Image (cartoon, helix red, strand yellow):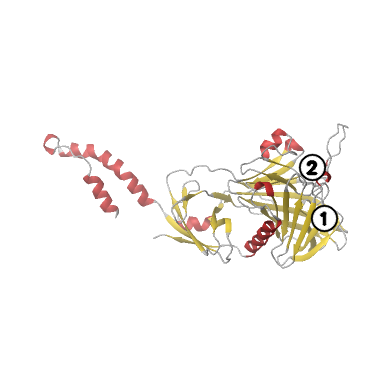
């Protein structure tokens, strides 16, 4: 096919009369023009391609499913692949936004320069079992795409750490907020490792805008912080459960951003050692925040002194609304799914859904203390405990009823238990 195209292109070149120009001069004059016309064809012929097949075992829809392809497989299939010189196409030929996630060796090491994963997203329709995509090399640099997931340390607000995607926002509290007010300036003091919720009406990023405005407890068209945390677990904070009492850490002591959009943000929060009924515990939480998702994946890795197994309580605040909202709260535990969902109807702020899912064998049931409803899970020292936590606001428009939210929580649990499988095949 290429030879036909080349021949056709050459045939279209307007040769000058041979009688008026010597043959060698004619060839020298025409050579640059030939190369110019053939360059796109030769470049296209040199591009490498591979096919990605994503297989889905579920019959439910999987919107914004993140497809993850290990970079070493891409490098093997496409030896000339460069991270910014790729095109990812769906089965219809549409170019898709993609992101490269760098390798992280362990929790104490910095990310190295080896590219670990290429990710992009696909909306699986209900009943869609497979989807195919093409990855191809190109000489063109991939254009930037809108950021839909991000995370950052916020030193300008007492060491907060905040994260968001196009659906919902969150934050939690750092060491400066826990520090005592030694100057009698009226500084806010809060000791809490609970997780806050920021309710968004809009899909674009709002974290920087709200912190800059320094006033986000009233909805001015983009959303609001209407969620109460205090010393509770908020929306998905953890503690150690001894059967009667929950032992919790202080505010996070360290942080590290591992990936920062546009599709996925990954970060870690480190909590210093605390005592839980004479057992000393430390924790590192790794959050994975994907565009288009209301629930974030969290992996908590505990270091346990003198013991190698604990019962973890992952909590939802029992009273997450301000008192003037006269909130009505419905709680739905589902042991078969390892999930606990909450639906809060407020007087003037709309409705808010929150949820926790422990999708694996670690799930151990439910409990409560004075502040929190808890999902219980078993954790072993040095082994990540994986769970999902998140929220949805009715005024964002994705989930306007309790039934819709609970159906979404059930689907999210099913997706976590049955991940997409990926194969990569070079095109010959």
Instruction: Decide: few, some or many residues near mark 2? Use Cα within 10 Å; few <14, some 14-19, many ≥20.
Output: some
Image quarter of residue 148: top right
Image quarter of residue 222: top right
Q: Quadrant of the N terminus?
A: bottom left
Residue 265 percent location from the top left of the image: 63, 48
**Horizontal side of residue 169 vs 32, given as left or right:** right
Which is more foreground, mark 1 or mark 2? 1
Image quarter of residue 67: bottom right
> Residue visible at 67% across and 36% down?
209
Viewer-nearest residue: 56 or 343: 343
Give the alpha-carbon distance from disc 1 to disc 2, as whole Å. 23 Å
> Residue visible at 49% across and 56% down?
74
Note whether residue 12 is visible. Answer: yes
Residue 372 percent location from the top left of the image: 82, 55
Note whether residue 69 is visible. Answer: no
Q: Secondary structure at mark 2?
A: helix
> Residue visible at 73% across and 50% down?
352
Viewer-nearest residue: 4 or 418: 418
Viewer-nearest residue: 267 or 278: 267
Q: Quadrant of the C terminus?
A: bottom left
Q: Check the image and report above or below for 335 versus 172.
A: below
**Horizontal side of residue 324 vs 13, given as left or right:** right
Q: Which residue is mark 2?
A: 175
Q: Secondary structure at mark 1?
A: strand
Q: Which residue is mark 1?
A: 372
Instruction: Decide: few, some or many residues near mark 1? Use Cα within 10 Å; few <14, some 14-19, many ≥20.
Output: many
Residue 271 percent location from the top left of the image: 77, 50
> Residue visible at 22% across and 41% down?
13
Residue 412 percent location from the top left of the image: 65, 59
């Amino acid at each position: 096919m290429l030879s036909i195209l080349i021949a056709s292109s050459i045939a279209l070149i307007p040769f000058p009369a041979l009688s008026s120009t010597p043959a060698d001069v004619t060839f020298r004059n025409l050579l640059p023009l030939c190369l110019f016309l053939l360059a796109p064809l030769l470049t296209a012929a040199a591009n490498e391609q591979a096919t990605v097949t994503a297989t889905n075992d579920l019959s439910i829809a999987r919107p914004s499913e993140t497809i993850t392809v290990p970079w070493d497989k891409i490098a093997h299939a496409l030896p000339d692949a460069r991270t910014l010189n790729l095109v990812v196409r769906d089965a219809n030929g549409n170019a898709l936004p993609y992101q490269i996630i760098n390798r992280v060796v362990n929790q104490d090491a910095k990310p190295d320069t080896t590219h670990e994963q290429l990710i992009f997203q696909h909306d699986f329709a209900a009943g869609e079992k497979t989807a195919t995509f093409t990855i191809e090399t190109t000489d063109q640099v991939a254009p930037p795409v809108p950021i839909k997931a991000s995370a950052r340390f916020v030193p300008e607000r007492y060491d907060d750490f905040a994260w968001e995607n196009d659906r919902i926002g969150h934050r939690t509290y750092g060491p400066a907020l826990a520090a005592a007010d030694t100057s009698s300036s009226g500084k806010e003091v809060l000791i809490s490792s609970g997780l806050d919720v920021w309710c968004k009406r809009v899909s674009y990023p709002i974290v920087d805008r709200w912190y800059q405005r320094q006033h986000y407890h009233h909805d001015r068209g983009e959303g609001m912080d209407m969620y109460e945390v205090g010393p509770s677990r908020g929306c998905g904070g953890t503690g150690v459960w001894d059967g009667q009492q929950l032992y919790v850490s202080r505010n996070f002591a360290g942080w590290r951003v591992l990936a920062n959009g546009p599709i996925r943000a990954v970060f870690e929060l480190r909590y210093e050692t605390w005592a839980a009924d004479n057992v000393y515990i430390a924790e590192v939480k790794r959050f994975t925040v994907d565009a288009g998702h209301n629930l974030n994946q969290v992996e908590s890795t505990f270091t346990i002194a003198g013991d190698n197994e604990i019962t973890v309580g992952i909590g939802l605040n029992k009273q997450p609304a301000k008192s003037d909202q006269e909130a009505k709260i419905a709680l739905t535990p589902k042991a078969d799914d390892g999930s606990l969902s909450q639906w809060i109807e407020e007087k003037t702020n709309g409705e808010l859904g929150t949820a926790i899912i422990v999708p694996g064998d670690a799930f151990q049931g439910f409990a409560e203390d004075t502040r929190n409803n808890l999902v219980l899970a078993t954790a072993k020292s040095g082994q990540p405990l994986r769970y999902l936590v998140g929220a949805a606001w009715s005024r964002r428009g994705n989930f306007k009823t309790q039934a819709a939210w609970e159906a979404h929580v059930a689907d999210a649990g099913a997706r976590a238990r049955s991940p997409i499988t990926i194969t990569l095949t070079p095109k010959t």
